[in-house]
Amino acid sequence: MTESHPLLQEFRSVIAIPVQWGEQDSFGHVNNVVYMRWAESGRVDYLRHVRQFPELPPRGVGPILVSVKCDYRKALHYPDTVYVGSRVKRIGKSSFQMVHKIVSKRHGIVAAELDSTLILLDYARNAPVPLSREDREKIAAFEGVPVETFEAVSA
């Protein structure tokens, strides 16, 4: 993490992304789908930190997005830079939930909050597999919390 924002103190994974002119839509603000791409970039950064980003093309076992929800708080415009914080909130048996917070550098406020759920997928069988204790330990170590924080729950 090279740059961050005080509103993202609870996030170990933070990336800075410049807002591009072409990301604005005909209404004159950043298009809603761009927030999803920013969260995706945050997820990739996080997964690389915890050594869970799959080789490409994916084979073996790796995470895959199954759900995403976004609460928009502030319309953004060019020029600006956003900070995207990503962290794991919960780990289930074969899934884990991440939260993402997008902060506008220009306005100094939270522009969006996202929740995403990923499963650990066996790409050959196209079936979910349980997260191992080692997976939980990697995430807990990166988050700076005891592994017991992420003991298996249903789902």
Image (tube, rainbow, N blue to C red):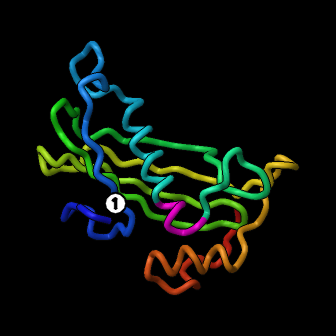
Please state the total of marks drawn on the protein image: 1
Q: Does 138 appear above or below 47?
A: below
In the image, what residue occupies the spot 35% across and 48% down? 113
Circle 1 sits on which residue?
Answer: 14
Q: Is residue 77 left or right of residue 152?
A: left
If the image is split into quadrants, where does the N terminus sit?
bottom left
In the image, what residue occupies the spot 17% across and 39% down? 80
**In the depicted view, which residue is nearer to us: 86 or 89?**
86
Q: Position of residue 76 (x, y in %)?
A: 21, 34
Residue 140 magenta-drawn? Answer: no
Q: Does 138 appear above or below 67?
A: below
Amino acid carrying label 1: it is: Val
Q: Quadrant of residue 148?
A: bottom right
What are the residue bounds of the magenta stretch?
46-51
Q: Is residue 131 left or right of residue 43?
A: right
Q: Quadrant of residue 8?
A: bottom left
Q: Is residue 11 left or right of residue 82?
A: right
Label 1 residue SS: strand
Q: Position of residue 108 (x, y in %)?
A: 13, 51
